[in-house]
Amino acid sequence: MAKIETIIKPNYLKQHSELTHKFNLHHGRHGWLRLTPAYSVKLVDQLLKNYDTDKVILDPFSGTGTTPLCAASKGYTVFGVEFNPFLVWLSEAKLANYSITNESLIDIAKKIRYLVEQKKIEPINAPNIFNINRWWAKDSLEQLCRIKAGIEKCTDIGSDMRTLLDIAFCRTMISVSNASFNHQSMSFQNQKATLYDNLLPSKFCDDVNYIMSSAVSHILINNDKARIIRGDSKSIQNFLPSKVDIVITSPPYPNRMSYVRELRPYLYWLGYIKEAREAGNLDWDTIGGTWGIATSRLNDWGVNSNEIFYPDDFLKIIEKIKKADGKNALLLSKYLSKYFADIWLHLQSLIKVLQPNAEVHYIVGNVSFYGNLVPVEQIYAGMMKELGFSKVEIITLRKRNSNRHLFEFDVHGSL
């Protein structure tokens, strides 16, 4: 594979946190929940400036809904595709227009606070998360179960009230947990939840206020112009209702960070999964997922190399990783092979829904295993060229903080 020149903008060889999820935290609905993998609303806004609003936008890995929300608020017709049911729900909630008043929602939140503080409501059963006491201290977990019971008692399933209170609950639930998000992947720290034991219902009310402050603003002229579709991006031609002009997306990076593992609390508390096997199944069906039973399945995974395009340089890297001195070397080589096999299937599917002269932007990051740098951006670019994309270029966006050799790129091309 002939390498495509990487365009380096000197001012982007810094970490530029404003191009990451950190920028989203103080921008209305984009900041409702802190989910680390999300990319920046600023980055999407910059890309959208290049296109007229009569263009149809697609994000085939829409995640937290950053691209759909940005595009919809500017008047574009936009489709988001996402496989994780919690993220579909969250994105739809971000895109919705709400007719309820701030006062009515706050009144319900205060009622729930009273019921919890006075123990006038029985708690729901705690979700079946493995080793749940690692996540929450006993008293905090009990109060969270009472707050969730209050939400279910005071609101109807599927109502605007239920949606907004559940989002506020998610903010409260994760903020009082022992989970730490200071690194690339989630970890646990020493028990901190005791700080909130007496203030947890009050914090829930504060989170309701925060959510409502941006929920009251209407963002769409026409709700039909923005849709989130739950589906597999490897077969996107089977369910996308129309062809698209522009793709702006950030697929999962091939760094073994499981989005299902990171989102377990939300999936369990909101009832999307009830046991670990469901989480493993969801992760296996998601591109880049290898957590739980997905790991054991990966050991048995194989692919017909005649059906997948792998650049020659990539196969050499796979062999180096496979022979590396590490107990997971073979597993990681299979992981990378499956990841790019899935991406190839996705790109083959994608070209079937693109209008002539459509343009795509894939925000991706390179990775390193056992000292072997995997040029993810070059592999994406090579696959695009193989599928007939023209004017393929790689633009360096920023340096990542996890390794001095790791960067984020915009791989851009036209069909």
Image (cartoon, rainbow, N blue to C red):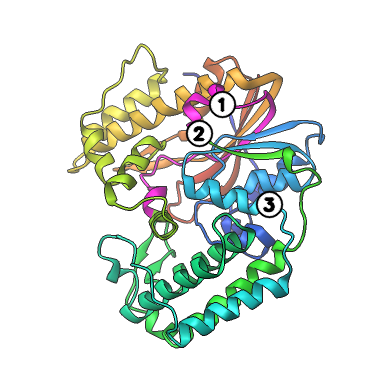
Do residues under tags 3 and 2 come within 8 Å of each other at their CB atoms?
Answer: no
Q: Residue at x 42, y 48 (%)?
A: 259
Q: Residue at x 36, y 77 (%)?
A: 142
Q: Residues within 10 Å of mark 3 (few under 14, many from 20)?
A: some
CA gap between label 2 and label 1 equals 8 Å
CA gap between label 3 and label 2 equals 20 Å
The disc, 1 or 3, on the residue closer to the chain's N-terminal end is: 3
- Which label is found at residue 96? 3
CA gap between label 1 and label 3 equals 22 Å
- Which label is found at residue 231? 2
Q: Secondary structure at mark 3?
A: loop
- Residue 359 % position (x, y): 68, 27
Amino acid carrying mark 2 in the image: Gly
- Residue 89 % position (x, y): 54, 49
Residue 4 placement, left or right of 141: right
Residue 137, image quadrant: bottom left
Q: Is residue 78 above or below residue 162?
A: above
Q: Residues within 10 Å of mark 2 (few under 14, many from 20)?
A: many
Magenta residues span: 232-261
Residue 336 in sight in this render: yes
Q: Is residue 359 above or below residue 195?
A: above
Q: Residues within 10 Å of mark 1 (few under 14, many from 20)?
A: some
In the image, is residue 411 part of the stretch drawn in magenta? Answer: no
Q: Nearer the viewer, residue 193 or 269?
A: 269
Q: Secondary structure at mark 1?
A: loop
In the image as oriented, which residue stretches furthest toward the top? 306
Amino acid carrying mark 1 in the image: Phe
Do residues under tags 2 and 1 come within 8 Å of each other at their CB atoms?
Answer: yes
Q: Which residue is mark 1?
A: 239
Residue 374, image quadrant: top left
Q: Is residue 140 above or below residue 316?
A: below
